[in-house]
Amino acid sequence: MMTHRSFFFIIGLVFSVATRGQESGSVFNFLSLPTSAHSIALGGRNISTIEDDASLIFQNPAQMANVSSNSMNVNFMTYMRGSKTGSAAFVRAQGERGTWGICAQFVGYGKMKETLVTGEVIGDMHALDMAISGMYCYNLSERWSGGATGRFIYSKLADYSSVGLAVDLGLNYFDEEHGFSFSAVAANLGGQVKAYGEHHERLPFDLQIGFSKNLGHAPIRFTVTLVDLTRWSKGYYYHVSQEPKAGTILINHFNVGIDIIPTKQFYIAAGYNFRRAYEMKAAGSSHAAGLTFGAGLNIKNFKLGLAYAKYHVSAPTLAVSLSYSL
């Protein structure tokens, strides 16, 4: 049986190895999209919020430790114009310390015109990304939990397709008495099994750390998440015409959010994604760039979450999450 020290050593080793050579472009970038309405409302990237909410496990498998057994969840989000994304999850406890789950997610990009290099339209084509995952979480102690996700990835663009395998590793520390949670996640460790062509590309690896803290006896919780901690060069912003300054690169790793929780049955959330704001303003869109909003209801075993954000200049994003515990 793996000891606590062995687990932490393996997690640390994977994190240190993964920090090398991660500056180049990647494939399967849909894996970086949030699925939970609550996460979207808190800036889009959240790995430390502790709630009995199965939608949160997509970004950190260690958060499964706080989800009720036999919980079901479905999520839906509008994306770029003509695109839709959805996901579903099921969580079940195993023994006193273990929890396992299965989940799936997809992004459908709708129908597009297929053209030759000359610009001649020769018909229509479709594009689809999807992933199916198995997850396991284990309570290492009263406050520590660790989790892992194994993921099968499939992508299709017209007559071309690609297959990949990935693993997420997550760790969470939760001090319920002081309302403090800290998490670390290494997401999308893996690679392409089958490439679109001859060239194999990297997966969108993301090393993240984050914390959440309740504000004393006030019904307020702050959340800070740092993402893409292996990418600090200006080349990371290859799709932005004007290179950012060093200070901008630093702040663009931050996602911040706030929950106002007047009762256990209701929350209002808001967030700010610094990198998304920078990129959308550079693309000519300043309307609510980086800002996110949302709210949620918890009625007995039923949970509803709604969120608004903007991921592309073509259209705003609306998200809904539904969860039910049997």
Image: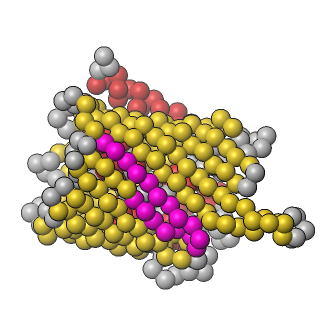
Apparent side of residue 225 relative to residue 142 in the rendered image (left or right): right
Name the quadrant of the N terminus: top left
Is 79 within the magenta? yes
Q: Residue at x 77, y 44 (%)?
A: 197
Membership of 160 in magenta stretch: no
State how the image is colored. Answer: secondary structure
Residue 301, position as x, y percentages in the image: 19, 55
Q: Residue at x 28, y 25 (%)?
A: 4
103 displayed left or right of 191: left
Q: Which residues are magenta?
A: 75-91
Residue at the top extreme of this rendering = 1
Q: Is residue 281 visible?
A: no
Q: Compared with residue 240, is residue 129 higher up or lower down, i.e. above or below?
A: above
Residue 232 placement, left or right of 13: right
In this rendered view, identify the residue nearer to me: 100 or 211: 100
Residue 119 locus on image (x, y percent): 86, 70
Task: State whether residue 118 is above or below residue 102.
Answer: below
Name the residue at 60% across, 80% down.
284
State whether the magenta stretch is mostly helix, strand or loop. strand
Relative to the observer, which residue lies in front, 205 or 89? 89
Please identify the quarter of the rendering in which residue 83 is found.
bottom right
- Figure disc tally: 0
Q: Nearer the viewer, residue 174 or 76?
A: 76
Q: Image point 73% across, 55% down: which residue? A: 158
Q: Is residue 13 above or below residue 323?
A: above
Residue 230 rendering spot, x and y as whole percentages: 53, 47
Whole-percent x, y for residue 45 in the image: 41, 58
Tell me: residue 253, above or below residue 155: below
